[in-house]
Amino acid sequence: MTAHEEAIAALDAKKSAQAQLAAAANCPPWRHAVFALLMGVLVYSPAIPLPARFGAYALMLAAIILIVQSDRRRLGMFINGYRRGRTRLVVFPLLAIELGLYSWSFIRAEAGDKQAPVILALIMVVVGYAGSLLWQRVFAREMGL
């Protein structure tokens, strides 16, 4: 086999591995929903009284650990959302929306508003679900699917 043929075979193997990775990362709808729910709970959290808020944060951390374990069992791996590549073009705007809604929720909760944090959290659930779907599509496209 010549060096040129070896290079072509290596590129083909890389493309095949990327396609397998993209196919394996195809998440079921419940996975997107759990991610979105966690983001919504975070936005709502300023409205929770302080001692219970720490409990909510602990439950969210436990849920993240369970998601990572679930992904590893289901896929054999966990793909970090903050990875390099085009997916960051989804992650950073999503993070900016999350921080903006969280800040707004915090301000409204401190002012005694009980409804705004709920509405903002529901908005974040919708944005989080759509963002999770978009991230998956961008990742699959980046991997060559």
Image: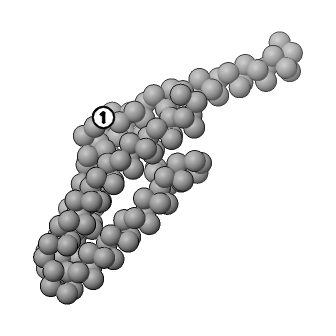
The residue lying at 85 percent from left, 20 percent from top is: 4
Drawn side of residue 135 relative to residue 62, left or right: right
User: Residue 96 appears in which quarter of the rendering?
Assistant: bottom left
Q: Position of residue 76 (x, y in %)?
A: 40, 34
Q: Amino acid at mark 1?
A: Pro
- Residue at the spot 38% in from the left edge and 70% down from the top edge: 99
Q: In the rendered view, would you say 105 is above or below 70?
A: below
Q: Which residue is mark 1?
A: 28
The N terminus lies in quadrant:
top right
Q: Quadrant of residue 144?
A: top right
Residue at point 79% right, 24% down?
A: 7
Q: Would residue 51 be visible to someone looking at this image?
A: no
Q: Height in image: 112 above or below 89?
A: below
Image coords of residue 62 (percent x, y):
24, 57
Q: Position of residue 25 (x, y in %)?
A: 42, 35
Q: Is residue 131 above or below residue 110?
A: above
Name the secondary structure under disc 1.
loop
